[in-house]
Amino acid sequence: MVRGQSNNAGHSRAAFSARDDGILAPKWSPVQSNIAKLAPEWKRILRPIDNKPLEDAMSRRYSRNIWAMVRQGPGTRFEAQRPIRGERNFMSIRSQTLLAAGAVAGVLAIAPASAQDAVKVGLILPMTGGQASTGKQIDNAVKLYMQQNGDTVAGKKIEIILKDDAAVPDNTKRLAQELIVNDKVNFIAGFGVTPAALAAAPLATQAKIPEVVMAAGTSIITERSPYIVRTSFTLAQSSTIIADWAAKNGIKKVATLTSDYAPGNDALTFFKQNFTAGGGEIVEEVKVPLANPDFAPFLQRMKDSKPDAVFVFVPAGQGGNFMKQYAERGLDKSGIKVIGPGDVMDDDLLNGMGDAALGTVTAHLYSAAHPSAANKEFVAAYKKAFGTRPGFMAVSGYDGIRLIYEALKKTGGKTDGDALIEAMKGMKWESPRGPISIDPETRDIVQNIYIRKVEKVDGELYNVEFATFEAVKDSGKTKK
Ligand code: PHB
């Protein structure tokens, strides 16, 4: 197995150099040189104007536009450029744009189809920055799965190419382009946050390769490309269930605190929908920034609104900080309970939260205390390998790489994207979280959602499951 990691979080002006006429021009880059290698393929792309191969008409003018398209992706705006001497100006800027878009789509479509011995998986994760705990958990889980199951499937060696996008969607897009065009990966996978998963979606569609979403949880994601399959969760799955539970269990007034981006908005919408339908009242709604949130001022407002409980959604990695500030402000002592999807009580951080977390009830897909043989084995192996307890992101990554392995087994090692997606549809297996399957219609995960309460077991804090909702589908799709 080859694992290459790079921190590609920043853009560099060094990619450009000043020409004689003072205009900044792109330097020869790996993406460009790859295009040069693929130049013979351009013969297949015909100019709409005269059906001659694009390659014959290729001039620096067009190649510059194509280069810009590859760097910046769909939506690139091209400047009108002076025709080069001797060249007939027979193409409008619009047709140049279409041609450039077609050429890039062609390059992306051709790239993964070339002969390969290894199957390459481009794993794009936040290994640095605020979401790094998600990246770490998924990277660990992928390593563990491959240690346990070997690095060869259907006669093909699996090569993981790990890239750090620091959860910045512009980085995700650039890294996905480079993985597809330069490395010719057969899958893109990972995606620590929703904006990252969405940024890669058009590239998966153009390249016709599976995008396996192992972390992000906004419902809309799987609707953005027919090549997206998800092994994580949706916020609708857990938020509707905790809302029903709260309304039926004496919680009448709730203040909400949600992270101010797509999954936070899903959590809020679906919680509100079910909680108010069950007779509950929302007394305060607060949204906190995703990056480096300071919860203290918001917690004061929460306390003043005197709710029975606060409904909290913060992404994996932020729960520890939230609970620390919740306890510092004395909300635990004032009897205001925390409820929510289980992201805030991630097993990864739970033990560090201390007794303020005791009694917290959340709904979620996974608990390290899930009482199955498969989970006991998984937790023991993960702890042995990495010294920490796995959380829900780890299990989502573990199932994500398993899905890739199983799909390859089914296609006999063939890497045609459409065949792989077909193979994934309807697949089911016993995960450490319980039974799961891939909905053949939506390509989204179908899984049990458990209601759990934080308790001390053998001196450690755990989310102890006490109710199970079986085979829950995502209820948050826009297309019904
Ligand atoms: C997301 O960005 O979709 C996301 C990230 C972390 C979570 C849940 C959702 O815990």
Image (cartoon, rainbow, N blue to C red):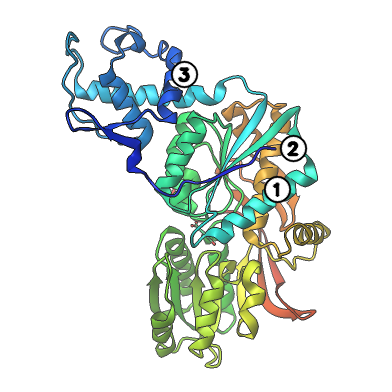
Q: Nearer the viewer, residue 416 or 382?
A: 382
Cβ–Cβ under 8 Å for marks 1 and 2:
no
Q: Is residue 228 above or below residue 310?
A: above
What is the CA distance from the residue labelled 1 to the residue labelled 2?
10 Å
Q: Which residue is mark 3?
A: 37
Graded by Cα atoms within 10 Å as few (under 14), some (14 to 19) or many (20 or more), the crowding at tag 2 reads some
Q: Quadrant of the rendered structure where residue 367 is?
A: bottom right
* Disc 1, SS: helix
Amino acid type shown at disc 1: Lys
Residue 12 visible in the picture: yes
Q: Which residue is mark 1?
A: 143
* Number of on-image labels: 3
Q: Which residue is mark 2?
A: 151
Graded by Cα atoms within 10 Å as few (under 14), some (14 to 19) or many (20 or more), the crowding at tag 3 reads few
Q: Position of residue 242 (x, y in %)?
A: 57, 71
Q: Is mark 2 within 8 Å of ligand 1?
A: no
Amino acid type shown at disc 2: Asp
What is the CA distance from the residue labelled 3 to the residue labelled 1?
33 Å
* Disc 3, SS: helix
